[in-house]
Image (cartoon, grey):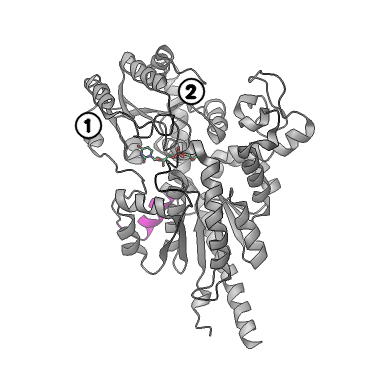
Amino acid sequence: MDNGENAVPNVIIFPLPLQSPVNSMLKLAELLCLAGGVHVTFLITEHNHQRLLRSTDAGSRFERYYLGKFSFEVISDGLREDHPRSAEDYEGIVNSLQGVAEPHLREMLRSERGRKVTCVIAEAVFGYAFEIGKEVGIPVFAFETVSPCYLGVYLCIPKLFEEGQLPSKGEDLETLVTGVPGMEGLLKVRDLPHFCRAKDPWAEESGKLIMAEIHAVPKAHGLILNSFEELDGPIMAHIRTHCPNTYMIGPVQQHLKTRLAERETTMPPSSNSFWREDKTCIQWLDEQPEESVIYVSFGSQNTLTMAELMEVWHGLVASGVRFLWVLRPNTLRAAKEVLDQNLVRELKKGCLECGRIVSWAPQEEVLAHRAIGGFWTHSGWNSTLESILAGKPMICWAQYVDQLVTRRLVSEVWRIGVDMEDRCDRLSVEKMVKELMMGSRRQELKKSAQKFSKLARESVNNGGSSYTSLDHLINDIRKLSSIKHFQNNLSCIG
Ligand code: UDX
């Protein structure tokens, strides 16, 4: 019955069905496959699988490099084909997926067929994955693909409710929140999610999901984070009081490059994008002077009203600074409104002298380009880490959840960027862009960003903090597998 196959760790990875979690979890999957002797099953929705296959070489890439070690397990997300699947309906997407994924995962973990599952690595928001793990006796690790500072703050939310600081009374969003380690004098009511100031917080769907996540994380077998000790060490000290078994293995994008280089595996630049990358912007950047261009991108989910979109364009043009702007087809706020391509053509024509507009860019390559001098970002965690890696200072325009906390750290603690708060009128845009690209604080911000870039790279080199932490994670997974192997053998004898 046992032919030794069961000693090979078999890990199920289960990301949120959104661009950035899929991207960072695929990178973790590659890191595990590269470690040798680990098999990964990547649980992905049909919709996202199709998008990956349409816009990247992910299918053939994984087959070529990780044949036999990596496989996709494709499931429905329970939504109609024409559902926009935008973050505006985040709760709807997560709840619909649960209807399909919960029984599917249970079946996968219970199945007697094929390779036995050693452990699961799931997005922390899938509280049911941790329950199923407990039910069937299979360890489940949580991977928080968002910022550790977000997690550190959110773990305190139940305490803030108990103390009566929340729900916040009054309308003053500037009120400081006290008692959150590492955030004294920094964290404001406006940085917390909306349900923290709702009259009936527990009636809000977002509140229920966030609270479920906060309660699930400490129950996980271990907690994996995409960051590095030298950046997030102080907040980690607090997180470890809730979850002692943590692994900080990031930035995963750079970590993967290091491990591939160690194996002398020459892999062309790869992408896990849901949109096809427009590489023509790299040729345009090649023609621009050093550090002369600001890169503008608000991630894969954030949306703008039409009025904001026009203010961004006018402000950028008025600044006189060269820019590269990612204007996704789903940039507009109302889910059904698709960006009018005639308008995009007009905007492009109107800035031929000073800018480029693309629908999706090879962001890591763009940020690393010598012509890029700064990044106007929405403070999504992947974008923030990629900017840190490239040593580029930022303008933060955060809209929700982790972005609101991350921008505080970027501007006030790490001091690698400036925060534009909610001011998105053309004059403020012009002023912020000029300030970042040629203002008096530019050198200070750049120096700080470059310091963290160096630390990030060192952390994923052999002996670095993230490198060592990933080794621990892999060893711990191997140990789990040999315990399972031993138990299987015992039950065979029995
Ligand atoms: C979402 C949430 O908005 C964010 O708050 C949370 O931190 C992660 O999940 P998203 O909007 O996708 O994130 O932003 P981010 O985490 O920054 O990820 C965007 C990813 O898309 C990055 O890896 C970036 O490199 C990539 N990207 C973006 C491209 O490859 N090309 C582009 O043109 C734009």
Q: Which residues are magenta?
A: 255-266
Quadrant of res 46: bottom left
Query: Residue 337: image x %, image y %?
Result: 38, 31
- Structural crowding at the residue carrying mark 2, measured as other residues with C-alpha within 10 Å and reported as few (<14), some (14–19) or many (≥20): many
Indicate which disc residue 284 carries.
Answer: 1
Give the quarter of the figure containing the C terminus.
bottom right
Which residue reaches farthest right? Answer: 163
Disc 2 residue type? Val
User: Helix or strand or loop: what does disc 1 sit on?
Assistant: helix
Question: Does any portion of residue 226 appear in the rendered image?
Answer: no
CA gap between label 1 and label 2 equals: 27 Å
Any atom of ligand 1 within 8 Å of the CB at mark 1?
no
| Residue 13 sits inside the magenta stretch | no
In screen coordinates, is 328 left or right of 352?
A: right
Disc 1 residue type? Trp
Query: Residue 376: image x %, image y %?
Result: 41, 27
Can you identify the residue that label 2 sits on?
418
User: Helix or strand or loop: what does disc 2 sit on?
Assistant: strand
Q: Residue at x 60, y 41 (%)?
A: 233
